[in-house]
Amino acid sequence: MHTLIISPIARDDLKKIYQYGTLNWGKARASRYIDHLKAQVWSLTEHPERGIERDELLSTTRSITIESHVIFYRTKNQQLEVIRVLHARQDPQRHIK
């Protein structure tokens, strides 16, 4: 199992997803959605190979689509770092550097 690290910008992504969900669908639904995203992130610590390789973005980067969002992450030295959590319509080339 890998240790989970969530980058500050990925934390901000999750916060914005929750805020958007609260405004559009209410707190209960937004909370369920964020909890689902977080559960999927935690599951990656046990099975990081689930995501697809995305070396075109950054070396050793992977991504996995969860409903309307894509989680971008990488592993190194038994650590799984979540880099970004973007909406599926967002261009990762613009948001991942």
Image (cartoon, rainbow, N blue to C red):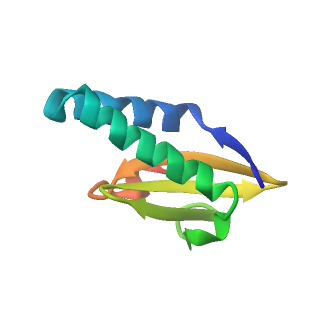
Q: Position of residue 52 (x, y in %)?
A: 54, 73
Count of marks overlaid on the render: 0
> Percent from the top left, x then y, of residue 57?
53, 63
Look at 61% across and 38% down and name the residue there.
6
Q: Is 94 on the left or on the right of 77, as rendered?
A: left
Instruction: Name the spot of residue 91 as percent of width and height, x first.
Output: 34, 57
Asked if one can make out residue 97 in the rendered structure from this viewpoint, the answer is no
Q: Residue furthest right?
A: 77
Vertical side of 53 occupied by 93: above or below = above
Which of the 4 image quadrants contains residue 34? top left
Task: Pick out the residue farthest to the left.
Answer: 24
Quadrant for residue 23, please give it: top left
Residue plotted at (82% across, 54% down): 78
Residue 67 lies left or right of residue 20; in this view the side is right
Query: Which one is in front, 58 or 34?
Result: 34
Looking at the picture, does residue 85 appear above or below residue 8?
below
Q: Residue at x 30, y 55 (%)?
A: 68
Q: Give percent across and percent down for residue 31.
A: 35, 33
Residue plotted at (55% across, 50% down): 41
- Relative to 58, residue 4 above or below: above
Q: Which residue is nearer to you in this view: 31 or 7?
A: 31
Q: Quadrant of the N terminus?
A: bottom right
Q: Is residue 92 visible?
A: yes
